[in-house]
Image: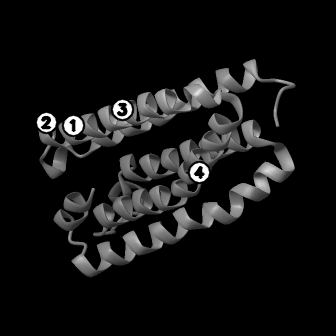
Amino acid sequence: MIVFLLSLGYSAVAVGIARTICTLFELSATWTTPRLIEQFGNVKAGFYSITWQALWLTFGVVCFIINWEDLISGTRYGDLIKASGLVGGVILSRIGLWGVDLTTQIIVQDEVEEDSRGAFSTAETSAQNLFEMLSYVSTIVWYRPEQFQWPMFITLGSVYAGCLTYAIYVDKMKGKDS
C-alpha cells in the first residue's frame, strides 16, 4: 500500500503521517475494547470489533473502486480521492483489528486449558505467519501499482472470512459469554 500511495503522488511525509495516525487509532483500541468488554462481554465485544473492521475496510474499498472523475465532473484528483478514502477506511478499521485481537487473547486465556495454551498459541502464531507470508506473496505476484486492487480484494475477503468464522463462534457461544 505504501508503494501504491507513493506512485499516486503521496509524499513520503504524508505516508509517514498516515502511518502515525493509524498507529494512534490502533492504540486507541486498548482504551475502547475494555469498555466494550464491560458492556457486552468478551465474545460479543470481539464480534463488534471484527464487524467494525470489516465495515471500515469495505468503506475504503468502495472509495477505491468509485470512479471519482465521473462522479465529480471536472476533478483532476480522482486517484488521490480514492486512495485517501482507502487510507481513511484502513485507519479506522485498525480499531476493530486490535479490538478483536485483544478479545480473542482473553478468550484463549479463559477457554483453552492451561496445559494446552502453549500448543494452541503456537498453532495460532504459525497460521498468522503463514497468512502474513501469503500477503507478501500477493504483492510479489501483483507488484505493479495498477494491480493493487487484487491484494486489496484478497485482504477484504480474508477479513470477511474471519468475520463469518467469528459469527459462527458467537452463535456457538450464545449464553456462555463471560
Q: Are marks 1 and 2 in contact (CB under 8 Å)?
A: yes
Name the residue that disc number 3 marks. 126
- The mark closer to the camera, 2 or 3, is 3
Report the residue at 31% width, 40% height from top: 132
Of the residues under marks 1 and 4, which one precedes in the sequence?
4
Label 2, secondary structure: give it: helix
Give the alpha-carbon distance from disc 3 to disc 1, as whole Å. Answer: 18 Å
Q: Name the spot of residue 47 as percent of width and height, x first.
A: 68, 38
Label 4, secondary structure: give it: helix
- The mark closer to the camera, 3 or 4, is 3
Place residue 137 in its image quadrant.
top left
Q: How is the image coloured?
A: one colour
Q: Name the spot of residue 114 as percent of width and height, x first.
A: 63, 31
Q: Amino acid at mark 4?
A: Gly
Name the residue that disc number 1 marks. 138
Give the alpha-carbon distance from disc 2 to disc 4, as whole Å. Answer: 28 Å
Give the alpha-carbon distance from disc 1 to disc 2, as whole Å. Answer: 5 Å
The label number, if any, that marks residue 129 in the structure image: none
Of the residues under marks 3 and 4, which one precedes in the sequence?
4
The label number, if any, that marks residue 141 in the structure image: 2
Name the residue that disc number 4 marks. 96
